Image (cartoon, helix red, strand yellow):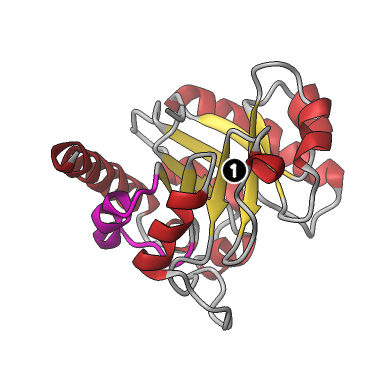
Amino acid sequence: MLPFDLLLVSDRASAQRARRTVVETIALALRDLDARRVAVLLRDKQSPVADVAAQLEALASITARAGALLLVHSYPDLAISLNLAGVHVASRVDVQDARDRLAPGMLLGASRHVDDPLDASDLGLADYATISPIFSPTSKPGDRRPTLGLAGLSACVRRSVRPLVALGGIQPDRIRDLMLAGAEAIAISGAVMQAPDPAQIVRDCLTEIEKGRSLSDTEC
């Protein structure tokens, strides 16, 4: 079982649409929240590494106060130097190389998409993979990639050797169906990052995840 139910993926463009920074948005999202089953993934491919590190340092106190995990996308060295919970790597990155660079016990996630392999040779050293896009991404209004939908998610779950985290166009009212389709956890980005009340979206997501997990257990 993964140490999180909800993976909150940052998106600078979505936060800017709400006239906030990523750090401000995450602080609002976790405000007054018991976030022990939440992981925050800082994904920032545009900023210099020094700026990414500065954001992580600011987020570290926010996530620690809420009890959330903190991960970074693409920078294993930052994950190690800042004592983060782990790192998430892009779909073209060698999982073996990423694992070799991490300290024992650190989480390793990987991005995977519609036709990517999900077998042991591909994902064997990862702890989880995000699978996307399930629906059209909220954070990428112009994204025209084919979506997996619930049937596609179920098919990926059946062939994956690692837990899958559903990502792409996810709103709270879709979460129970995603859990029933086999998602181990839920990743959300634009719906939180550009929300007027990010904390309410996070609370709604956690509630729906709990309901979805209960329904999954009942069906089993």
Front residue of 167/99: it is 99
User: Is residue 158 rendered to the left or right of residue 160?
Assistant: left
* Residue 97 sits above or below residue 191 on the image: above
Image quadrant assignment for residue 207: top left
Q: Is residue 46 magenta?
A: no
Residue 216 placed where, x, y %? Answer: 22, 42
Q: Is residue 103 visible?
A: yes
In front here: 139 or 61?
139
Please determine whether, in this image, residue 143 is positioned above or below residue 57.
below
Q: Which residue is mark 1?
A: 41
Q: Residue at left 28%, top 44%?
A: 209
User: Is 139 positioned to the left or the right of 44 in the image?
Assistant: left
Where is residue 12? Give x, y as percent: 63, 60
- Answer yes or no: is residue 187 visible: no
Q: Position of residue 195 (x, y in %)?
A: 40, 62
Farthest-out residue, left: 218
Q: Is the residue marked by circle 1 packed among few (<14), some (14-19), or many (20+) residues within 10 Å?
A: many
- Residue at 58 percent across and 33 percent down: it is 127
Can residue 170 be found in the magenta stretch? Answer: yes
Rendering quarter of residue 81: top right
Q: Residue at x 46, y 27 (%)?
A: 3
Q: Amino acid at mark 1?
A: Leu
Quadrant of the frame with the N terminus: top left
**Mark 1 falls on what kind of element?**
strand
| Residue 24 shown left or right of residue 155 in the figure | right
Query: Residue 27: x percent and y percent?
Result: 49, 41
For the C terminus, which image quadrant?
A: top left
Q: Is 55 placed above or below 132 here?
A: above
Which residues are drawn in magenta?
A: 168-183
Instruction: Point out the residue furthest to the top here.
Output: 104
Q: Residue at x 20, y 36 (%)?
A: 217
